[in-house]
């Protein structure tokens, strides 16, 4: 537990992270699921892990994986349908120009929903990362919008035990992803009450959003269902450790999560390419705990007053005090 | 006329553009309204001009200004309520933390709507540029959202002869503006049919959008009411001449404007700080004409086919041919 | 004094800051020099102020200004030749395409050097902000490079009592400035020992540099002569208060200033558009003091060890501890 | 041949490009060296290919590879020492904190220089992509600078038949690379006449440079030895096809290459993840040919005159004419 929330991590936190140059990975992670889970267990306070279809879980191993988790007292906090690790999704999944691919994307999502229901995981994360375009004149924006909405509506109705969340990102792996901001998620899923939202802090930062504002907006529409934590330098999804760059923004986010009464998981989605995996997760945990403690120390009412007055020098002094400087 | 549309320009195109260092302006523009209009008249094909409250038009001179336009055969294509040229709007207008300021903002908009109705101008441009924040912990995002929506609903009902358009921008003059993307405009004004949208190409580029996608999205919801043309290097609203940087994006935009059957004005919003004003406007006009001609030369069906196939090399070859290279 | 250094501010900190929309300024600053200085005096610990030619000081008032400073026990820590507040510099100063303008730029610099010598100010800040280009095909990069170097060499030899510093910036007021990075300053002035460098933290951040690295590099070549402090969101020179965004980067900078034994002024260059001027300067001061204190608390050797080992999780833990989180 | 130059491509143009999500690659490329070369031969006008150590060439296959090239009438235009495809370089190569790693980096470079000499390839490309840092307090900037310079000096003296080129990049695979701009290359290698520079257009764009300016600067110091062509959206090294985004910048670059009398190869460095490889290379070739033709059509003197006058509207009209619009 962390600041009153379940605390999770994406499984690749404990794998050997690769990039497009070093395809074999920088090392230091677990090779098998068991090894990764054993590393995860070393992070005190960690309650569960996210799994990605195809990379971690598939038709053959799903029950075996469940057993590995149970044996270690870990929850599966999220399943992510694989819509992006294979070449067949290269031009899109649920908004691909090719109809058969779109259908395969929907089938993949539904299959993972059923796994989730069986495993007691109440949410899945639809990240349509390949749904977008790289070049001008390469996408029919209106058709894609329609395809994506239809697919989400279709999936949402599939299994009432599992809520479909949409994760947005401005770019990567495409130079432009269709679902690129919190507002876009809300617009795309307007009227689809059973479809929720997933806010990845790094995606929000790289999309040019103020992340607390994005969280507040999603919450207003009842779609702040889940959070991914990491940090970056704003121009790319660096998936760095929490505490690397955006301290003030994280502090403000901690306040808004309390304010909108967020009840969900606090889950890490970092790629510690060159770092020791367990230490990296611990650092993120301690930074997160620190932000929440700082908010509690200052107090919700005091912060609300500062915000209401809108005076930047007063806000600055409050942040300085919150950080004990 | 330009490519079948009325062709307009914001009046500051013909003024002496200033920035925060050279507050007196870089020169070369008209000093009086007459001088600015006389420069505008030298741009062959120009049908009308946009005016900004306080800078160009006010309670005292509104009818005199109308006379100056009539005498020169020019239309007033847009009136922009002044919500940003005076210190009193520094912390916001219709979403200011101060209630009296919010009311003043609404009153200003309604006043300009009445001027517009009287002058036969069917649209006004609400650009809430000062409505936003500079620092974390300086804004209550949910209150601001509500204030802004209420204000727009209130204004929209004021005068049925004038449509209220909302212009979005990611930042400047605030480091963060609340209404920062096409999706945000659509979300904010969902259900308010009488409120439309204004797409400024430079704002869209600087917001990280693909501008043709933004146009298509606004059109889908019936809110692509008006366009501002200019160019920039993506990180700031440089208000450069059309043709400066984003040729492929402009070509794609021209296609989508034809495709969604856009009927409105094509209006320049450039700040030719160091350029000859008339020549700058002419250049923009000729580039715009070139983009539309290129689309017509290639043909709507051919382009639609390329888009449907989504093959980037085919798209590249088409662009190359469209540009006669 | 601040952390063992003289502490200064640019005079516009205490003026009514304007931008290109609100040309009259957002208010709250002093109107006359006396008023600005009286505001400055309210910032405890402030030792001196920077003045900009034309805006603050000119042929007529230079001695009067000196008197106003003396009367208040304030130093003039820097004079900035006006190469950017007037339309005549719009296309450049010492690297303008027009030879007469280049000569006028050099004359302006030399005149200000003489003022500085007379006033006991040992440095001037050459910020060639207008020397650059907005569009492709608008500048002869090699000629400009030569003109600029020749001008700097010429000025540097003018008055041995005053050191000429070059301040770099990526963009604004031009979309591209020629002298755009620390490396560019060092390359441009290689061999000109009497020409130094001025590092504006915000310019460095907006140029995509890591600011501590830029400082170290300038120091290595003996050209870290002076510093401007402010903060921004990386895409523009927002001139915000210290502590607004980049806490970790500032902490690292404080370490490197100690490490390279920086002896110069710590000077604020902020534009507190909408803020109370005195409070804004005080906040910056307290944040700066906090960063240096944190470095001292952790200790130079401890930090050096962390850096030498290059382990990001250890660095993260150290930052967390330094901020008392 | 292309516009009077040898025309090359990096071998991965014809491989199955992978990214960090789709590690198996998006397909469509050759699997073996033979297959890749056979694809390359389909690109009419292609004269040679670049090879990367470890990925393509190693101690065992170097002569066999030479034979494959000879059999197809292709040159090896560049060898790239592997300083970035293996986990052992994860924390740097020639500027790694670990001395043994630095020595291994130098040995790797020298080994590749010897291969190059043997294969008749006069240049190698040192791209120190892993030499940098991800987090603050993770690098000793001054030590790294010294290590890198010493290593380059050491390697440069190794084999007089082979010139060592340095390729710069702002980021990726590290969030910050040490050698991040053209100016940085020139500063780092000042006085090392036998070390040259490699300008990758995409790296330059993503570093916030104007690419023609970077080329001119490198040429001024005799270090514009080699060029990589590709395109991107400025915030990341997307490695897209030429002609994707920056048409005006490419046109200006073509002019400056003629102007500084560049004699080297024109080499593609693209990652056509989802594109047909041969068509992608052909498109780049045709765009490049188009830019050079446009420059020749307008004429060097005409362009020089436009630049000398520095009038943006005249420059705009010239670009428009050059593109036949």
Image (cartoon, coloured by chain):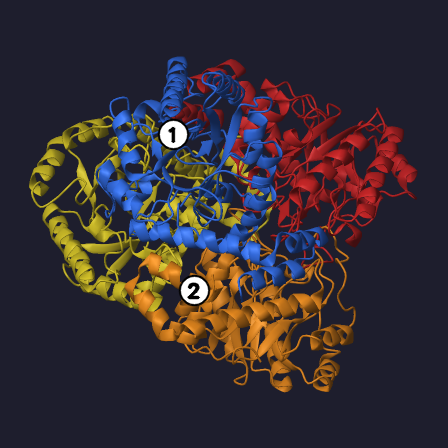
Chain colours: A yellow, B orange, C red, D blue
In percent of the image, x 30 and y 34: which residue is there?
Answer: D70
Calculate the distance from the C-alpha at mark 2 to the C-alpha at mark 1: 35 Å
Q: Are marks 2 and 1 on the same chain?
A: no
Sort mark 2 into few (<14), some (14-19) or many (20+) by Cα contacts within 10 Å. few
Against C117, residue A164 (above or below) is below
Q: Residue A269 appears in which quarter of the rendering? A: top left
The residue that disc 2 covers is: B321
- Left/right of residue B292 with respect to residue B124 in the rendered view: left
Seen in the picture, residue C218 relative to D157 is either above or below; the reply is below
**Residue A233 point in image, percent of width and height:** 45, 40
Q: Are marks 2 and 1 in contact (CB under 8 Å)?
A: no
Q: Chain of mark 2?
A: B
Residue D96 in the image: above or below residue C30 = above
Q: Up-down: is D185 above or below D269?
A: above
- Whether residue D24 is visible here, answered yes or no, is no
Residue B113 in which image quadrant: bottom right
Residue D317 x/y as whole percent: 62, 63
Q: Dot 1 lies on which element?
A: strand
Query: In the image shown, does B92 or D191 lie closer to the viewer?
Result: D191
Q: Is residue D269 left or right of residue C235?
A: left
Figure quadrant of residue A251: top left
Q: Which mark is residue C2?
A: none
| Residue ID at (20%, 48%) | A82
Residues A325 and B320: in front is: B320
Q: Disc 1 designates what residue?
A: D80
Q: Nearer the viewer, residue A241 or A128?
A: A128
Q: Position of residue B287 (x, y in %)?
A: 56, 67
């Amino acid at each position: 537990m962390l600041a009153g929330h379940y605390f999770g991590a994406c499984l690749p936190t404990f794998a050997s992270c690769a990039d497009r140059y070093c395809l074999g990975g920088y090392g230091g992670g677990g090779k098998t699921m068991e090894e990764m889970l054993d590393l995860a267990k070393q992070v005190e306070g960690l309650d569960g892990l996210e799994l990605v279809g195809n990379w971690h879980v598939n038709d053959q191993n799903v029950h075996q994986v469940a057993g590995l988790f149970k044996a270690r007292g870990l929850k599966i906090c999220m399943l992510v349908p694989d819509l992006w690790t294979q070449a067949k999704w290269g031009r899109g999944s649920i908004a691909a120009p090719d109809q058969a691919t779109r259908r395969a994307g929907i089938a993949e999502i539904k299959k993972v929903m059923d796994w989730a229901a069986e495993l007691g995981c109440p949410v899945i994360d639809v990240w349509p990362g390949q749904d977008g375009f790289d070049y001008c004149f390469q996408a029919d924006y209106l058709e894609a919008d329609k395809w994506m909405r239809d697919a989400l509506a279709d999936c949402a109705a599939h299994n009432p035990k599992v809520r479909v969340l949409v994760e947005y990102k401005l770019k990567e792996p495409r130079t432009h992803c269709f679902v690129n901001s919190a507002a876009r998620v809300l617009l795309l899923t307007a009227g689809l009450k059973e479809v929720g939202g997933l806010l990845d802090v790094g995606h929000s930062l790289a999309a040019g959003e103020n992340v607390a504002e994005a969280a507040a907006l999603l919450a207003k529409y009842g779609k702040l269902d889940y959070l991914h934590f990491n940090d970056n330098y704003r121009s790319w999804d660096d998936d760095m450790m929490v505490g690397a760059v955006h301290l003030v923004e994280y502090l403000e986010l901690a306040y808004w999560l309390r304010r909108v009464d967020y009840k969900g998981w606090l889950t890490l989605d970092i790629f510690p390419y060159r770092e020791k995996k367990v230490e990296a997760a611990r650092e993120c945990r301690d930074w997160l705990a620190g932000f929440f403690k700082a908010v509690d120390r200052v107090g919700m009412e005091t912060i609300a007053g500062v915000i209401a007055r809108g005076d930047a020098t007063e806000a600055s002094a409050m942040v300085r005090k919150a950080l004990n400087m």
